[in-house]
Image (tube, rainbow, N blue to C red):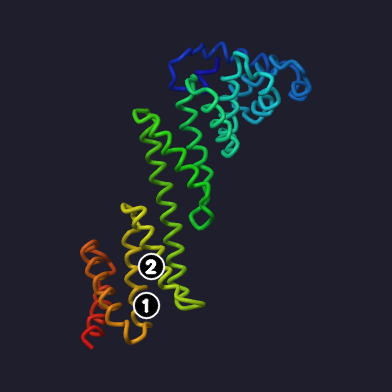
Amino acid sequence: MLNVFLCPDCSIMKKNILILLLIALTFTSCGEYNKLLKSNDYEYKYEAAKCYYIQGKYSKASTLLDDIIMQLKGTDKAEESLYMLAMSYYHDEDYVTASHYFNTYYTSYQNGTYTELARFMCGKALALDTPEARLDQSNTYKALQELEAFIDVYPQSKYRNEAQQMVFSLQDKLVLKEYYSAKLYYNLGTYLGNNYQSCVIVAEDAMRDFPSTKLREDLSLLVVRSKYQIALKSIQEKQADRFRDVIDECYAFKTDFPDSKHTKEINEIFSASSKRVKD
């Protein structure tokens, strides 16, 4: 078994590393890789795949395992081969394929040797595949779902803290995506509609969904600015109420962020809005 390589900190069924390395050297000297690919001996391919894995030749290991994974199904090698295949893709930074096989492993072996780790690695692989914040965040939501499920299933896991940190990081990315959207709406102003109102909606939704976000001050500032612009551009009958709303937002901003570098701007908006209410 390859537990010592597949799960370095796992104490289950550990084997002598030296013996495995000697086996790896034997396979290295026997024939060429292309001969292995053409072989119909799936047990031989399996042993070769293990040795390639030991040597860090993950692409070769995954190619061989992909070729025999169905033949190994139902055998005593099935569980280890499936996890080793997932790890091979993970080490080769093919995170989408790795997450697929990690998911296949933990759904197939709910009490397997590597079930807890496979579930964690599935979320981690998905997290590593998420795009930068300006792009579509569908994969980020998938990674979050996987990691949050892992934390729920294994609340005492030694991987919990790392999983939680990844959750926070992914949430930050989602908030940043919303911030970019809100800022874009603000910059569009009244182009083809009331984009200021859209800015307010996006920013307030982001703060409601992620109340502890580090971007809360920036989002709050966009809300104040947008509501001020909405008030300025409102018809006369609605201006007083909307400027009062701006004043309330200014009070809330100064309460939440008393040391903000934007305090001067907020005070100017507050003063201008107060004058319009009196008028």
Q: Which residue is drawn at 32% across and 85% down?
A: 237
* Residue under pointer 1: 230
Q: Which of marks 2 and 1 is nearer the N terminus?
A: 2
- Tell me if 81 is positioned left or right of 134 in this view: right
Work out whether 259 lies above or below 104.
below
Q: Which residue is drawn at 53% across and 28% down?
A: 107
**Furthest-bottom residue in this view:** 279
Q: Which quadrant of the structure image shows residue 248?
A: bottom left
Q: Which quadrant of the structure image shows residue 268?
A: bottom left
- Tell me if 83 is positioned left or right of 155 in this view: right
* Residue 124, percent from left and from top: 48, 37
SS at mark 1 in the image: helix
* Residue 60, percent from left and from top: 67, 28
Q: Do the residues labelled 2 and 1 touch (CB within 8 Å)?
A: yes
For the C terminus, the quadrant is bottom left
* Residue under pointer 2: 200
Using a 10 Å C-alpha cutoff, classify the residue at mark 1 as few (fewer than 14 neighbours), some (14 to 19) or many (20 or more).
many
Q: Which residue is drawn at 35% across and 82% down?
A: 232
Work out whether 78 lies above or below 125.
above
- Tell me if 52 is positioned left or right of 1 in this view: right
Q: Residue at x 53, y 56 (%)?
A: 135
Residue type (three-letter) at the residue carrying disc 1:
Ile
**Furthest-front residue in this view:** 237
Q: Please tell me which residue lies in front, 1 or 32.
A: 1
Q: Give the spatial CA distance, label 2 vs label 1.
A: 10 Å
SS at mark 2 in the image: helix
Q: Please tell me which residue lies in front, 54 or 136.
A: 136
